Amino acid sequence: MITITHFLVVSAVIFCIGLYAVLAKRNAIMILVGIELMINASILNFVAFSRYDKVNYGGQVFALFAIVLAAAAVAVGLAIILNVYKYYKTINPANINELKD
Amino acid sequence: MNVSITDILDQIIASLPLFRPELLLIVGFIASICSALFVEKRLKNFTSGVYLSTIVLSIYFLCAQLTTSATGFSGMWIVDKLSTYARLIIAFAAAIIGLFIQQRHKQDNNGDVYSVLLAAILGMNVLCNSSNWMLAFIGIEMVSIASYVLVGYFSKQKKQAEAAMKYALFGSVCAAIMLYGLSLIYGLTGSLDFQSPQQLQGLMVAPEPIVTIALLFVFVGIGFKLSFVPFHVWSPDVYEGAPTAITAFLSTIPKIGALILFTRLYTVWSSTAFYFSDLTSGFLLFVSIASMLVGNLAALRQKDIKRLMAYSSIGHTGFLLMAVFAYQDAFQYLLFYIVAYVLMNLATFIFIDALEERTGSTALSSYAGLGRKMPVLFTAFTLVAVSLIGLPPTMGFMGKLMIFSAVFDTYQMADEGIVLLLLVVGALTAVISLFYYFRIPFYAFLRNTESLQIGVAKSQILLWVGYLLTAFVILLGLFPGLLLNLITA
């Protein structure tokens, strides 16, 4: 029997993996992957909770919009990273540090 | 639940008049894409015409909504005075920024930038008008994605590409964290409307640790848009790296929308006597104090004027949060300070840009000795700086005075130590800001340098707009009633 707890545990684990990928900061693409994982953890949460919201399925609608917005954000992010590669020949955030205090 | 589809359709059609300014923005967005694709090559500047006429028409429709106070789309869309005035301020600022971009980027502009700007303004309007988490998230993401594109749009240097990347990555992480917080809130309460009693009741009975996590995660997303401490780290880099016209956009418009959302959220969430209300108001007080301190202290050691303005706007955000704290039912103080902030920031960035065009630098030291060569510009710049500090007889002073007195009234009623601390920090940081804003006239009038090359300005129109804004800052500082009567009438 799979209960809501299972969904929540899985989504929390995915969220933490995503957060780790972001904080480790090896590579700009890896950060984008981490962001995508975090968003998908939230989408999983929304869909799981939406089972108990029989009135208007707000969670499922939210999940659909979140998928669209995540795709748009990642597309823009990839274009920007491509532009950065053109100037710096690297996408490691540690080496891209012309702007600083 | 079975609601017949005809009922839903009837409700949507009945709500459409409330959505008129936004529908117009959508039409303008599509029209400006088409015009940038097909017309711009033959008729230069046609798209900016489309942009400006869209903004003017939306101002017209917003004025028609001034007396409306209603909800539509099954409670998702709120139109009230606060949102209408906020959208009017956004539209006016957007018109000036459109002119700014049109004047400043004539060669490298093929018109696409206006459609992105319109999308950002649409997102801001959504933020102003919603009490629903789904619309709020869509609004925040629309503004964010459009801003990432804008920062990288005129990318000609390494710095701009880097600023765009830092902004996009930081912003997406904050949005993802906020989304996770929202999913937790949805799970705890079963409602997505933050003003609904169902959500408040759900938050009252939920266990404290999970409420703490959910609320703090949600504030991360709002904090990124408002750039308060500790989510401000992106803003100095992005402000410095982005073209000045885009920096003017980033420092004004996105903050208005996010601030209105946060105000709505705060008034409802802080109204109960339960744990989540204490957490919300404690968080607001903490970030307000921290933003004022960090922003103003870090600004002291900046050498680049755009970085200095970034920290100064973090400090102003702290002050605006103080206005949110004082906001009870009278929103005119908050709106007055928002208007003051927008006017001051737009004028400052127009002057910074005019100087950058002539000297080719945004370093403070490049202003040395320029005061004698451009006396009018630097006099106006100094007046705006006086207003940013909050000294009379300017608008910044009146705005700060009103907020201070409102917070002081709250202190006298509640008698809490932390509110007094808020007042003290607010006053203290205003004094600190004196030191760095006055470095602008100090360099311009009191330092001398050898003969330096000053280029010729291409556009005078923009400078005149800057002088006009400065005149407004002084005029509304002397006669604040002009604006306050308009807002309260």
Image (tube, coloured by chain):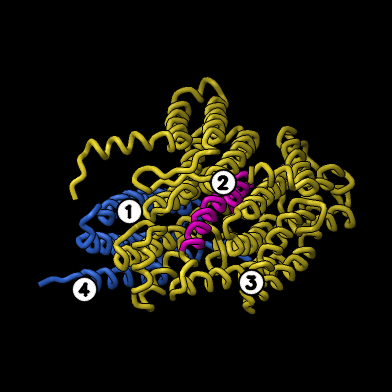
Do marks 3 and 2 share a subunit?
Answer: yes
Badge 3 or badge 2: first in the primary sequence? 2
Amino acid type of disc 1?
Ala
Q: Which residue has dot 2 on it?
A: B86
Chain in blue in the render = A
Q: Closer to the camera, B205 or B114?
A: B205
Count residues near mark 2 (Cα–Cα under 10 Å), then give few for <14, some for 14-19, many for 20+: many
Tell me, yes or no, if residue A9 can be seen here: yes
Q: Main secondary structure of the magenta part?
A: helix
The residue stretch that appears in magenta: B240-268
Q: Which residue has dot 1 on it?
A: A66
- Residue B3 sits in which quadrant? top left
Q: Which residue has dot 3 on it?
A: B413
Which of the two discs, 1 and 4, sits closer to the camera? Answer: 4
Which of the two discs, 2 and 1, sits closer to the camera? Answer: 2
Q: Closer to the camera, B424 or B158?
A: B424
* Residue B423 is inside the magenta segment: no
Chain in yellow in the render = B
